[in-house]
Amino acid sequence: MQEKSHTWIYVVLVVAIVALMAAGVATYQNEQDSAAARAKAKELTAALKAAGLQAPDEHTIVAIFGSDGGRFVEGVGSGLLEADFAIQSGNAGPASRAVILDDDLLRAGSIILKVYAPQKLAAWEDFLSGLKFGQTQ
Amino acid sequence: MASTGVTAEGAAAGKVKTAALPSVKTITWLTMCFMTVSAVASIRNTPSMAVYGLACIFLYLLPAVVFLLPTSLVAAELASGWDGGVYNWVRQGITPQAGFLAIWTQFAMTLTYYPSLLAYVASTLAYVFMPSLASNGYYTAVVIIVVYWASTLVSMRGVGLVARLSSSSMLLGTAIPGTALVILGVIYLIQGNPSSAPMNASALLPQFAGLASLVLIVNNFLSYAGMEVNAVHVKSMKNPAKEFPKAMFLAMGLVVVIFVLPAVAISWVVPAKELTLTAGVMQAFTAFFDHFHVAWLTPILGIMLITASLGGMMAWLAGPSKGLLQIGRQEGYLPPFFQKVNEHGIQVNILYAQGAIVSVIALLFALIPNVQSVYWIFSAITTQVYLIMYVLMFIAAMRLRKNQPDHPRGYRAPILPVLAIVGMVAAVLAFAIGFVPPSQFGDGSPVTYFFMILGGVVLIGLVVPFLFLKIRKPSWKQAVPEPAAAPRD
């Protein structure tokens, strides 16, 4: 009897999950694959290599950063995303806490911003200046 | 929803306040296993560990040996002999006051965990639909409050429902996408592509470069925190003496596999570890899928990760608060108002109070930039507080072996004293490392950080439970049956 009374909860949740997935696929736009995006990808690849860092292939860079830096650039300067970043850099799940970051893992940020959004470089470097780094690899 | 073996829902158990908690057998061992995995493991931070390549195996296996194994086997033995979960183990093994402290520390940790988990949910949802929302405090606040209260109201409908939802969400949001990542990674290698991360023997061990490396390794002990949390529901199992240990054994294996294999698979496919953390974890998943020209799977994965996060949260909602209720009733540590249960035996007023506290914390987090910038400190403090529980649990396990050697147990952990000591040392080490300032503390004084964390631990972990114990009244104690030994064959 109790199981029956919960059926509507299962139905609502299944419908909601399927609907969100369908809507997500429908609205999710991979960063625009345009000539501008490809040019920026080439520029980023060259800048990363010049700094001695690895660069993903051009298609992947376009998918992530598009022509304007995509979601990464959008988040720079947001306290919420920086808080999220602190959480993501440690272990996930309950009892999570921040760690001592490796500066190697964040060096690319400035390079990305120089290519896609120089106007946000100061905010990013301000964020980095508040961090203390260590070596983990 | 995938069926995970819930057999029947908890039946009504009488009136509020003095009602006995229902003990209808609603949870199978497999459901308990999946529910435990749901509470502990997820693949949402997998790209963060993938940057270490093959060394992430070491970074997960060492903590598994020194922390996961002891906590799981000790919890398996204790739950196979005593009902009620950690509060009752510590209560029986040490003192009722220590039992209350143990469950309080577990409960306190969740108060900062929920807002950060739900902020992740809001951020991922925004990533899928409208990325600009991710930095909008009002949007984040609304998502946290609405989703948290919806989950709380659902969890009030009985532990059987919670068990089914959290275990199903683990399958949908962790097991399926984790398997897909591993399969795609293997396909990548079969196609003849070179691994993006070095795969030779020298890459197996992380470079040990001092304090930062030690913090990283020891912090990973905490990846396995929470294996004990669902033991509070053993009375909802038909034969917990045998079934709970079985659930823990499988959960241990699943948790390790879920952490390790998808991280290794991502390190094969996604190059440029320098980009992964910078660009964000969802972007790393995008890069992974983009290699296979299925980047449209990213929003589906996003929804799956959200589902898993919420399922895991529900497992936590139902656990520590129930333990708090049980010891609050048995020892009279909580005012009668907080001892109220609904017809499903759920501690409704504790959940309402918890919801009010979480809502305030979440609003502060979402709307006030100064809170956002220091929120990680609150998480660090409550994690420290939670580690106290593990020390108490291991002490209780050793004392129960010594003082109640003939108490019936469905499972006896091999070399329990060794396990307990190893687990306790790991917990103490994790506690000590918790005083090392992370990157976010910048150039602040380590001494200042030490005293900030210590002050928080004393306030939340000692002063608050002390106040509860101080103000308790004998009349608050309810005549409820003593938690019995778990049934044996």
Image: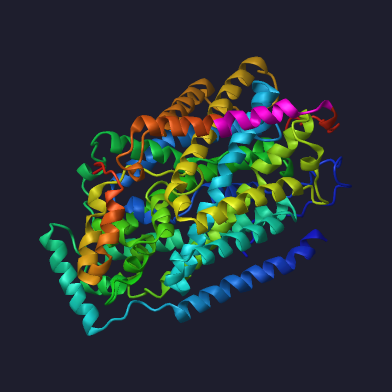
Which residue is drawn at the image coordinates 42% and 53% (left, top)?
Answer: A83
Residue A79 as seen in the image, left or right of residue B108: left
Q: Nearer the viewer, residue B375 or B166?
A: B375
Quadrant position of the N terminus of chain B in the picture: bottom right
Residue B431 as seen in the image, left or right of residue B54: right
Q: Nearer the viewer, residue A65 or B248?
A: A65
> In x, y percent, where is residue B72?
54, 36
Regarding residue A24, the answer to whether it shows in the image is yes
How many callouts does the rendering have? 0
Regarding residue B193, the answer to whether it shows in the image is no
Quadrant position of the C terminus of chain B in the picture: top right
Residue most extreme to the left: A50
The residue range painted magenta reads B459-474
Residue B94 counted in the magenta span = no
Q: Nearer the viewer, residue B484 or B336?
A: B336
Residue B14 as seen in the image, left or right of residue B229: right
Give the overall secondary structure of the magenta segment.
Answer: helix
Q: Please, is residue B5 above or below residue B108 in the view?
A: below
